[in-house]
Amino acid sequence: MEKNLIEVNKLSFGYSKDKLLFKDLSFTLKKGQIKAIVGQSGAGKSTLFELILGNLKPLVGDVSCAKASEVFQDPYSSFHPSYSILNQIKDVASTDDLQIHLDVLNLEYELLLKLPHELSGGQLQRASILRAVLMKPDVLLLDEPTSALDNVIQLEVMNNLIKNLDKMGMLLITHDLELAKWCADDIIQI
């Protein structure tokens, strides 16, 4: 029987005890699954990722997560401004499969030699996805990973992420309900 990569059990959290973002939230994620978290701005979607990563402590309940990497909504905040993209990838991941993933993400190797501000938002977001996948996580946490991409590239990137499901599970935050319906096995409304 496949073990759970993420277990969220009766989780309650709020920045004040009298105003909870969520109460008694429970779900699991297994390898091969994509679950989407959908909710309005301020509903606690990104906060849930912080809880899953152990950066915040729940008021009530338990959270456990296997080895995870995250793709942030704002790629500029996830890269150091004065180091090349390639050096930042090499700091955290093996580059053995680099060319395969560059081809999949439609990125040129030369772009990785540049500083983050020298790339467009879409290029930098794909570099962020590249870094996260090269880390070989059990769980890929995706916070609006395609919001900076045009529709054609968005579809290509999501199709290529789905091809990695034999190696991992994915938890996707999105405002795009149609994207969630298209790719997710389950949608969690918060």
Image (cartoon, rainbow, N blue to C red):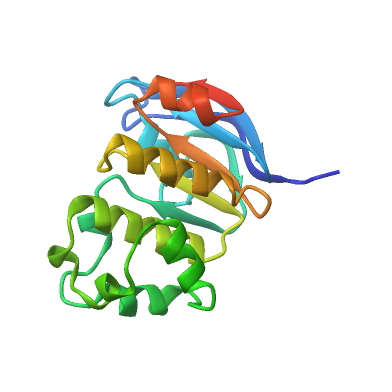
Q: Is residue 5 visible?
A: yes
Q: Is residue 145 visible?
A: no
The residue closer to the viewer here, 131 or 108, is 108
Query: Is 169 on the left-hand or right-hand side of 122?
Result: right
Quadrant containing the N terminus is top right
Question: In the image, is 33 to the left or to the right of 119?
Answer: right
- Residue 14, percent from left and from top: 37, 29
Residue at image point 38% right, 24% down: 21
Q: Quadrant of residue 170?
A: top right
Give how far across and how far down residue 141 sits, in percent. Answer: 47, 47
Q: Is residue 44 above or below residue 47?
A: above
Which one is nearer the viewer's eye here, 71 or 57? Answer: 71
| 32 sits to left or right of 157 | right
Q: Is residue 28 above or below residue 162?
A: above
> What percent of the width, then of the height, locates residue 30?
69, 41
Quadrant housing the C terminus: top left
Residue at 25 percent across and 50 percent down: it is: 122
Q: Looking at the image, which residue is at 30% across and 53% down?
A: 125
Number of marks in the image? 0
Q: Position of residue 47 (x, y in %)?
A: 37, 38
- In this rendered view, identify the residue nearer to me: 9 or 107: 107
Which residue lies most toward the left here?
Answer: 117
